[in-house]
Amino acid sequence: MSVLVIDIETTGLKLGSHSITVIGTILYDLTSKCVVRSHAYNVLQDEESGDTDKIVDTKNAVIKLLLECTRIVVFNGLRFDMPFIMLWLQQAPLPTTAEAVPRSYDHFSEKCVDFCADCLELNGNYVSMNNLCVLNKLDVCKSGDGAQAVLWAKQKKWKQLSEYCMQDVHVLLRLTQHAIAHGLLFPCGTMFAGVMPSKTRLLPYNEKCDALREDAPVATAKVTPADLDIFMVACHDIFRA
């Protein structure tokens, strides 16, 4: 069983007006707990070079990863990364496997795990990747932000851009590994600096009605008391075949 951890960088936020610059990928095998492949695809650099064969090869490689993996892990990817990727795959030059490209990213929604979207669904608030790492006591963090990535693309600093994108993918992989082994803590409400929630609610990573059921067990955590809760989401089942 394989998990594709994927992240993109773009020239901006508007689908149809802005373009993908880099696609970072890690293919992770859940059985061996090993990284099978790690690669950054420099999409904009290839397009500016005019190398059609290389562009087609990149699209073929990305399609293969998306179709053959068991799960796709993204961070705000259902709203951002996947729509950008699907539009890019449908633009000329088309991949040689164009017939295998779904017409909509909805095709992949069933096997997508989006931690950012999950937090939004649970409590109506976004959580940053860095804050999620802090809350779950992971010693990794992003190396920059999206604005810096856009600037690097304008400056054609491809190496820095690729490294930044792949760092995001590595952070997301760590979150995935932690989710599988221990579940994930999600903030309920706004996270304030220095304020840790006083309770943890254990939620299954299944249907909405189950995740929000009233009889979900509550365990008191030994942290600074606060009028906040954190959701503990058990993620084991979603990564099973």
Image: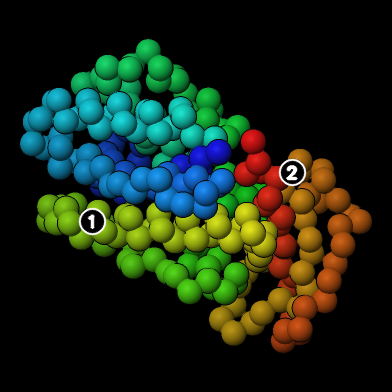
Residue 129's x, y, as percent? 49, 62
Q: Nearer the viewer, residue 5 or 83?
A: 5
Whether residue 179 is visible: yes
From the image, which quarter does the C terminus lie in?
Answer: top right
Image height of 117 relative to 181, above or below: above
Image height of 191 relative to 171, above or below: below
Dot 1 falls on a residue whose secondary structure is helix
Q: Residue furthest top?
A: 99
Q: Which residue is mark 1?
A: 161
Dot 2 falls on a residue whose secondary structure is loop
Q: Amino acid at mark 1?
A: Leu
Q: Residue furthest front?
A: 32
From the image, which quarter does the N terminus lie in?
Answer: top right
Image height of 109 relative to 91, above or below: below
Q: Which residue is mark 2?
A: 206
Q: Residue at x 42, y 69 (%)?
A: 141
Residue 221's x, y, as percent? 77, 78
Q: Which mark is residue 80?
A: none
Q: Nearer the viewer, residue 153 or 170?
A: 170
Residue 193 quadrant = bottom right
Residue 58 quadrant = top left
Q: Residue at x 86, y 51 (%)?
A: 213
Whether residue 146 is visible: no
Mark 1 surroundings within 10 Å by alpha-carbon count, few (fewer than 14), some (14 through 19), many (20 or more): many
Mark 2 surroundings within 10 Å by alpha-carbon count, few (fewer than 14), some (14 through 19), many (20 or more): some
